[in-house]
Image (cartoon, rainbow, N blue to C red):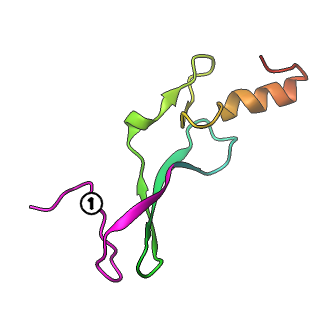
Amino acid sequence: MSDPAKKLCPECGSEMSLAVESYPMGSAFLHERFHVDIFRCRKCGRVELFASEKAKMVTCPVCGATHSPKEKCPICAINTAFSGHAAD
């Protein structure tokens, strides 16, 4: 049985490596952005996107939006920018 966490390149069959984890797709104006893990084949250079696991996401305690733990809440950042108030 193959390892489900192992990603194989559909082009050359080599194992792909994780290049970027939980990359946000779509506009920051969307309340729920779609996040992907980006895998790259070191042999042929092909790039593939896979849906990020929900466990890697955090929920903003202020607005309820989900986002990567590597970024600040985009919805709160936009609300702060348009409100004229400084962020905490």
Q: Is residue 74 above or below residue 6?
A: above
The residue wearing badge 1 is 6
Q: Which residue sits furthest left?
A: 1
Q: Name the dominant secondary structure of the magenta segment.
A: loop
Q: Position of residue 31 (x, y in %)?
A: 61, 35
Q: Position of residue 60 (x, y in %)?
A: 57, 23
Q: Is residue 47 above or below residue 20?
A: below
Residue in the picture at 31% in, 76% down: 14
Q: Which residue sits furthest right?
A: 84
* Quarter occupied by residue 18: bottom left
Q: Is residue 72 above or below residue 64?
A: below
Q: Residues in magenta? A: 1-21
Horizontal side of residue 79 vs 59, given as left or right: right
Query: Element at badge 1?
Result: loop
Indicate the quadrant containing the C terminus: top left, top right, bottom left or bottom right: top right
Q: Position of residue 20 (x, y in %)?
A: 51, 54
Say whether residue 77 is magenta.
no
- For disc 1, the neighbor class at 10 Å (few under 14, some 14 to 19, many from 20) is few
Residue in the picture at 63% in, 17% down: 62
Indicate the quadrant containing the N terminus: top left, top right, bottom left or bottom right: bottom left
Q: Amino acid at mark 1?
A: Lys
